[in-house]
Image (spheres, rainbow, N blue to C red):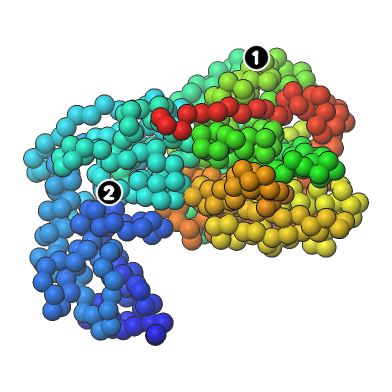
Amino acid sequence: MNSTIPVIVDGKKVEVPNGSTIIQAAEYAGIEIPRLCYYKDLTPTGNCGVCIVEVKGQKGFKRSCTTPVTPNMEIITRSAEIINARKTVVELILANHPDDCLTCIKSGDCELQALSQQLGIDREKIDKVLTKKPIDDSSLSIVREPEKCILCGRCLRACQDIQTVFAIEAMGRGFNTEITTPSGSMAESVCINCGQCISVCPTGALHEKLEIDEVWAALNNPDKVVIVQEAPAIRVSLAEEFDLPPGTNLVGKMYNALKMLGFDYVFDTNFTADLTIMEEGSEFIERLHENGPYPLITSCSPGWIKFMETFYPDLTECISTCKSPQQMFGALSKTYFAKMYNIDPAKIVTVSIMPCTAKKFEARRPEMRSSGFADVDYVLTTREFIKMVKQVGINIAAIDDAQPNDLMGSYSGAATIFGTTGGVMEAALRTAYELVTGKALDSCDIKEARGFEGVKEFTIDVEGTTLSCAVAHGLGNARKVLDKVKEAKEKGKPSPYHFIEIMACPGGCVGGGGQPYGSTLERRLERAKGLYDEDGGMKIRKSHENPEIKKIYEDFLEKPLGHKSHELLHTHYIKRDALL
């Protein structure tokens, strides 16, 4: 079978891969067909009908996102009839859609707004039949605004097909159809707060719960000491919002922007990523010496943790008790930082800049108060941080680099790759192997852990013991790994794996639900490359070699898995109801 076939798009002959749809073929011809429900990384459904085209010799319009091409197919993507039909479809959507674009969270990024302008639609001339629907802001992470929903189905594909959570579904029929939860409340659903539904929503019908105003209030309060941490994925995600190549590492400019915003101390979540490796790596070494229990599964992704508590609670003993780097930082900010800088912890406000909407939920978990206060006070997504920067007119691309403050600002290359799938596994093995054997791995680059394959499996030899490792990203892929572990456990057989890394979001944190819109697989790969490039260029690439990590154990924590570490850096899990 030929790998490519010829088609004709608006009179231009092009060769396209066999199996392409019309919308993909048009892109090879340099033509972007208007669309709403279509999203590159999701299964096309043809819900909206905006992407219609004509095919010579065939009657009626064809939905280009679901129609495969055939050899020598002649496709017409623009004619008076096609354009008028598209306008009619969009006008019908707008007739039941609010016009509050100036106050909409997605203003400037709204695909419906952009498409209306592209098609030359005068929204003031459209007769409205708007049905008022209450906003659901019950969740700690995600707000649902049903009035803005256009029933494109993208969120369903992300939640059901990719994440296999099924927190939301289409309920009702005809004009009464609504994307909602069985109870009508996001808080009373099995939602794991990952925000992948937000990433693909074209109109802002789903968005994160904003905490920008609260952070501004803290920054403007002279009685508060406001400190900030930023996840590794942030530094490679800002560039695309400031007309720089995706994946460009703006770490120094990020620090400077935060200082310009008024934060009193700028630290880095990468510091506690290194700390996580010391604690989690020590957990693994302890199990290695005691021959189990296996597997040990990483605990850095709060979406994955809630997924486990809901769907796989019987595997709780397999999960590392380590808090995520965000929460470790929060606990230390009001204990270690407060002590070293002689600041009353009651005056400290800790802010996180995260690529993840689930971090908002994690910060509010009742277990996360080991400092005696809320360990993390506010969590901003990458998008919220960008809004704040633009509100005060900072052009990140044009400002100088700066350095973070001392104490909790230095990090190794191992920490920075936490932001991509496989990074936690690779970082942990770099340290655990050396602490067990006294020898360094032949290379810091563990290429078997890298890449965006859904599940990666490999082995590594540690002084004659062959360790089986698995890396999964996206919760549909996580199920494949977890089901193997669960099946072995139920049959009384040894675990097929010793060590497992799971990230809730496809691509890991670079693809988090709080990242800039348009987060396709291709874009996530570019961000991941930026992290690997930083790691490869660093002098210190192993967590246990970070001098500030050595200092915190000498001055405060004493040793990994010690009494104070358990008190501040470790947690426990609960069983949640999967039938909500």
> Helix or strand or loop: what does disc 2 sit on?
loop
Q: CA distance from mark 2 to mark 1?
A: 46 Å
Q: Residue furthest right?
A: 438
The label number, if any, that marks residue 346 in the structure image: 1
Earlier along the polypeptide chain: callout 2 or callout 1?
A: 2
Quarter of the rendering containing residue 17: bottom left
Which part of the image, by quadrant, shows the C terminus?
top left
Q: Is residue 531 visible?
A: yes
Q: Is residue 271 visible?
A: no
Name the side, left or right, on which 32 lies relative to 508.
Answer: left
Q: Residues within 10 Å of mark 2 (few under 14, many from 20)?
A: many
Name the side, left or right, on which 543 lies relative to 226.
Answer: right
The label number, if any, that marks residue 152 in the structure image: 2
Which part of the image, by quadrant, shows the N terminus?
bottom left
Q: Residues within 10 Å of mark 1 (few under 14, many from 20)?
A: few
- Which amino acid type is shown beneath numbered disc 2? Cys
Please state which of the two labelled residues, at mark 2 or mark 1, is closer to the viewer: 2
Q: Position of residue 97 (x, y in %)?
A: 20, 39
Whether 37 is drawn above or below 66: the answer is above
Picture residue at 14% right of the left edge, 47% below the top: 92
> Helix or strand or loop: what does disc 1 sit on?
helix
Of 462 and 560, which appears nearest the observer? 462
Q: Position of residue 399 (x, y in %)?
A: 57, 46
Q: Position of residue 383 (x, y in %)?
A: 46, 41
